Amino acid sequence: MDAEDLTRRAFMKSLAASAAVAGFLGGTGAAVAGPPGAPAAGAGRRIAVRDHRGAPAIMIGDQALPAIAYMTYLPHRGQYEDFAGAGYGVYSVACYFGDRGINSTSGIKPFRPGLWVGPGNYDFSAVDEDLARVVAAQPNALVILRVNLDVPQWWESLHPGELSVSANGGTLRQSFSSAVWRDEAGQALLALIRHIAASPYANNLIAYHLGAGQTEEWMYHGNRDRLPDYSEPHQRAFRSWLRRTYRSDAALRAGWHDPAVSLRTATVPDAAARTGDPARLFRDPDSEQQVIDYYRFHSYAAADAVVHFCRTVKKEVGDSALAGAFYGYIFETTHVDVGQHALHHILTSPYVEFLASPSSYLRRQPGYDWSYFSLTDSVKLHGKLWMSEADTRTHLTVGLSVAAPEINPTGSVPGPYDTALWQGPDDPRITMSLLRNNLARAITNGAGLWWFDMWGGWYDDPEMMAFMAKARDLVAESLTADRRSTAEVAVFADEASMAHFGYSRNHNQQFLYGQRLELGSMGTPYNIFHFQDLLDERTHDYSLYVFLNTVKVDRDLRRAVQRLRDRGKSFVWGHGAGWFGYGDPGAGGVTDLTGVEMTATEQAARLRVTTVQSTSAALAGIAPGTTFGTTSAVGAPLIHPTGGNGEVLATVEGTSIPGVVRVEHRRGGHSTYSVAPRMPPQLLRNAAKQAGAHVYVDNDDVVYASHRFVALHATSDGPRTIHLPRVAAVITDAFGLDDTPIARHTDSVTIQCREHETYVLRLVP
């Protein structure tokens, strides 16, 4: 019977009959099976994130768990039975310590009752009810419990001195640096863990996903508007950080160029110092080191709270459950006040085992790569699992005023949760393509994911649920293949550099947030790392290295770059790379790092360029006069090539100043420096080809690739030839009705594409 002819409930009943319902039992129907057998329950079960076939995976005993799950904010509107019928065994369930909404500025109301009802007093009935709902649908459910640690209102009344204080003197929930919050919320967390351990759901729990701050994502409440945090706990924590960093008053005075400051009297800089001079691109270390240090600490404090609470979990549960959080949003939240720029602190902690984010909100439309927020390959390099929150809106998504007016800040009247951001495509075909794209990105990048049915009912459709069953099978199948990366391009971003930029986020918003669109359309996959991981030899086998915001580069990192240059590697450099860390700040440090002769002009930086007339292979396929970059205001100086030792590919728009220059290295390879962000896909693709990296397609389609799967999201109608890095014995359509080959014994395959469709090919070596 055709699924379209069935009612949804009848269809799910027929699907469940052929599915391996118990989550960890394997695949559904005739699809490729996952690991056989359910995980062992009880106190002896060991859960860890470990390497599995070349990438981190959740391991229960010696079995790899397909890390694909379902979640909703509104359990009474959830589709637990449907997902159980589709073979899902993993579910995320949310609970809240506080009694307010997850967003402190929008007015959204709480999704569920708070658990922390008074000092040392807890009411766990809401979480029990929600776990019971999941287990009723799937008795073998494995649950990731998402715990929001934000405080209730009564706690604020008892502890006014422990709240985050804005520059205007207002308060917004707890300070991340509050020892009282860490202690008392930690006790509440232990009470929750022990309650679960003594409940009928003890064997269902496999992980604790800890959240706090704005939207549970460890962002400071009121971050960009109110300049937190001037609380006394935060001031004390800043001084402690300074003591660990400088160790003596003399060192601090030298660093801050302030003969009166001491480790005992140092303070959080005032609002005027923090916002600084908008006419300058960088902070001046001679006069602004206090601000630079504060913003390094500001992110550290949020990251350290993550580590603290994950430590609390792990010391209680041992290896019977995992601990993780949202964090590391350097690509999505480029503003320093948000507090997301201390990922390295978390990566070096043994207590944090997984990290997560949604897909980027940069361009949530068909035709684009929906990248992740963070340095996901550094997360994997450090042995941790990356999880994607796939909160993709579908054609069934309705605004919160319709789905749950009792929670919506404007009730049944459309408000902030009814805008275009909260709407999905009108066309069901586009919905299906976007969901395939989310899945393809995860299975080719060694990531897990959960389908986030925020308000409930977003997947209430037979075709979507058939897809969900297939998605679960493909995640399980991906665990049976070589999961090592196939990327030959490495992209690096630097957290330490973020505090050295002026308060405006325009520069990093374009080089980090925006540049991901073009990286995702260059025709070849890329890995994305923390700059510090360039010191790890496991990052030294790529063909092309792209550095986006690396303006602070110490001696060790400069030596690592030189060693790669000596091996004939190729590089792409963003504006100002190497300005700090080579004697006095200046163009000499940029020349030293990039190999491109540089100078600086004391004018507001115009980070927009126009390509020149040239026969250079670096500009192949790019018409003369093509402009790219940003018109956003960026302060002085403009740091640009002289053009004296390389080939000029573009000039600063409206001038003859070299804007993009390419230099050949003596031992092979090349360096390309661009003052302009948003370097076009064709320029990046040309650089990749000349560096020797494999390119899968010669247009701007989105491509994801692993050893088992290659996916293409088409930007237009027409045939596409996908070039593989090696011969595949058999190529099949991963979403086909059967495993009929579409090609055999070939290193290229041509498929007929429809605009905005996503195709996933299975490669059998």
Image: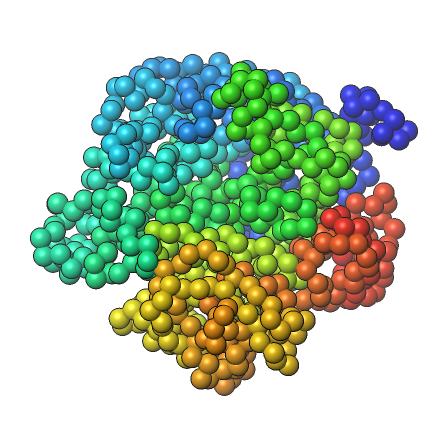
Residue at figure coordinates x 12%, y 50% from the top left: 262
Residue furthest to the front in view is 654
Tell me where residue 252 appears, x and y as whole percent.
16, 56
Q: Is residue 221 left or right of residue 448?
A: left
Among the 4 quarters of the image, the one containing residue 12: top right
- Nearest to the observer: residue 3 or residue 207: 3
Tell me where residue 305 appears, x and y as whole percent.
35, 38
Tell me where residue 462 appears, x and y as whole percent.
78, 29
- Nearest to the observer: residue 129 or residue 649: 649
Compared to residue 737, the image places residue 514 above or below, namely below
Q: Looking at the figure, which quarter contains the N terminus?
A: top right
Compared to residue 34, the image places residue 118 above or below, namely above
Residue at figure coordinates x 63%, y 51% from the top left: 369
- Nearest to the observer: residue 348 or residue 318: 348
Residue at figure coordinates x 63%, y 33% from the top left: 423
Compared to residue 731, the image places residue 591 above or below, namely below
Tell me where residue 322 appears, x and y as whole percent.
49, 37
- Nearest to the observer: residue 670 or residue 677: 677
Residue at figure coordinates x 68%, y 46% from the top left: 366
Q: Is residue 588 left or right of residue 692?
A: left
